[in-house]
Image: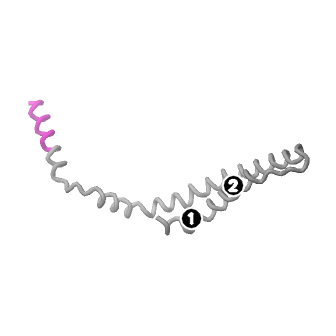
Amino acid sequence: MNNLILILNTLIYKSLFIVGSGDVSSVIQETWKNAEGQIKSVVNNVIFPALSIILAVFFFVKLGSAYFDYKRNQDRFEWTAPAILFVALIFSLTAPTYIWKLL
């Protein structure tokens, strides 16, 4: 009896998968439309601020270490790393205003 139930369940589930149209792109588009607001909210209110905080901390730490290197190397200040971190910080602070227009 148990084998018969197992076979019937297997046939029913396999037939359900065969009936599907196989149009994956429309399923993905529908899922995106349903979750778009939640995804945007989480990214704008959690991900970008967390990334901005991390970049700000790295920027000020690198700026401080560059200043101490400047004092040690007799008036030679390295701007490269602080400049890259500053640009990344500006990008992460302004990204929520235009990133969704690009996607």
| Residue annotated with mark 2 | 84
- Percent x, y for residue 33? 38, 64
Point out the stretch of residues depicted in magenta.
1-12
The picture places residue 1, in percent across and down from the top left corner, at 8, 30
Which residue is pictured at 66% across the width and 50% down the height?
A: 54
Q: In this view, does 23 lie to the left or right of 67?
A: left
Residue type, numbered disc 2:
Ile
Q: Residue at x 61, y 53 (%)?
A: 51
- Give the residue number, with chain letter if any, for mark 1: 96
Report the magenta stretch's main SS.
helix
Identified at 11% across, 39% down, the residue is 8
- Disc 2 + disc 1, Cβ < 8 Å: no
Mark before the other along the chain sequence, 2 or 1: 2
The local crowd at label 2, few if under 14, some if 14 to 19, many if 20 or more residues have their Cα within 10 Å, is few
81 on left or right of 67: left
Distance from disc 2 to disc 1, alpha carbons, whole Å, reads 20 Å
Please tell me how many numbered marks the rendered image carries.
Answer: 2
User: Camera-side residue: 47 or 102?
Assistant: 102
Q: Quadrant of residue 83?
A: bottom right
Magenta region includes residue 10: yes
Horizontal and vertical percent for residue 61? 76, 48
Name which residue type carries label 1.
Pro
